[in-house]
Image (cartoon, rainbow, N blue to C red):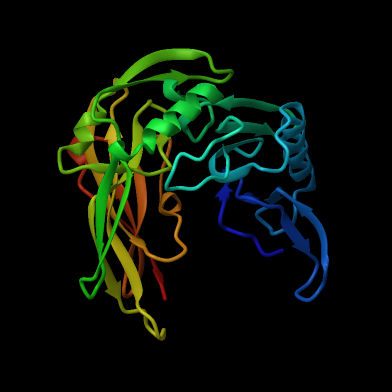
Amino acid sequence: MPVPLDCAAVGDDGSVVTVGVCQPIRRFEGDNAPAVMERRIWVIRSNGTIDESRTEGFNRALDDFQEKHKRGMGDCYTRIAFYTGDRLGIVVDVPRSPQEASPIDREMGILVLRADGSYEGLYYALAASKSGALFTEDPRQVGIDAQREWLRKQYAPENLVEYIVLDEDNSTLRDRAPAYPEKPLTISLVGIGRKVIREITLQTQRVHEGGKLLVEPGARIDSQGRLYIPGRLTRRQIHPIDVPDQQLDLGLEDGYVIARFKPDGQFDGIVARLKIPVYRCRPWQLWDIDASGNLYSLEFEEKGVVIRMVSPTPAQSADTRAGIRAQR
């Protein structure tokens, strides 16, 4: 079974979970055979076979959530927040225009599905840890009324910031998008069951010290409570690189950065700067952190793809190459 990678994650046991973003994923027995089944979630073992038990359990949990909360068929599952093998955290979103605060009729957040067919949430979370034991909840987004107001303010014309993208021939694209708050933001660090562990005041105003930073999805937290948030700069450039044996270049857009905050909310700096492929790319899939806070990202070069690592320890924070290269 070919595995769609639009929304996928790998568990510690080597299994792969893949989630249909806005529609179910069809299973085919062969290249030219008709679909025999469709599900929103599939779990594939490391040997390539379908894990029927976990597949059934996660889908049963999702169906139960949709039925009890009268969600209907309008939800999209845009990202996987974490996958431990027996628990799966998915970001539940509502289709709407990315350029405006379209009305929403249901809550958004992180839904935690269990392989036994039960579920937790929603968590009104900005991010989750890889173990699914920690979440950072944004009080501006707790409940549907708060989420509607948050979207209204987020996309109000006076709160949008202009950005410019320069093409390789110096032609320009101009548009406007939301930026991170210019004042400190208080969030909650919560555990399983939304039990509040502590309140944290993020020094979000400091992410703008090198210029305005636009909001990007895909934040993460490590086991120590350090928060990593991605963003984009307001002036970006597209850099083409030659791809051997391919007619077209690979366009890479700079200006994608990752900011880190300490467990007490203090700004810890911009810890990674990435160049992102222009077409059909989901940037949050090009970087990740481990439980210790080591940050891994992909760097595209003409000879292949390099994995870069950044340590969470200030004294060792210089970028190091992981020594892994995929040759084209």
Q: Quadrant of residue 299?
A: bottom left
Furthest residue in direction front, as rendered: 157
Q: Quadrant of residue 132?
A: top right
Q: Residue at x 36, y 73 (%)?
A: 250
Which image quarter is the N terminus in?
bottom right
Asked whether, in this view, residue 159 is left or right of residue 148, the answer is: left
Query: Can residue 311 be seen from the camera position used here?
Result: no
Q: Quadrant of residue 247?
A: bottom left
Q: Residue at x 69, y 59 (%)?
A: 48
Asked whether, in this view, residue 249 is left or right of residue 105, the answer is: left
Query: How many numbered markers are drawn?
Result: 0
Q: Is residue 318 above or below residue 225?
A: below
Q: Position of residue 62 (x, y in %)?
A: 72, 36
Q: Is residue 90 above or below residue 297?
A: above
Q: Nearer the viewer, residue 68 or 311?
A: 68
Query: Can residue 64 be seen from the camera position used here?
Result: yes
Q: Residue at x 21, y 42 (%)?
A: 212
Q: Residue at x 74, y 59 (%)?
A: 26
Q: Position of residue 73 (x, y in %)?
A: 71, 43
Q: Position of residue 134 (x, y in %)?
A: 48, 25
Asked whether, in this view, residue 212 is left or right of residue 155, the answer is: left
Q: Nearer the viewer, residue 259 or 301?
A: 259
Q: Is residue 301 above or below residue 26?
A: below
Which image quarter is the C terminus in?
bottom left
Q: Nearer the viewer, residue 57 or 310?
A: 57
Asked whether, in this view, residue 197 is left or right of residue 314, the answer is: right
Q: Position of residue 22 (x, y in %)?
A: 63, 50
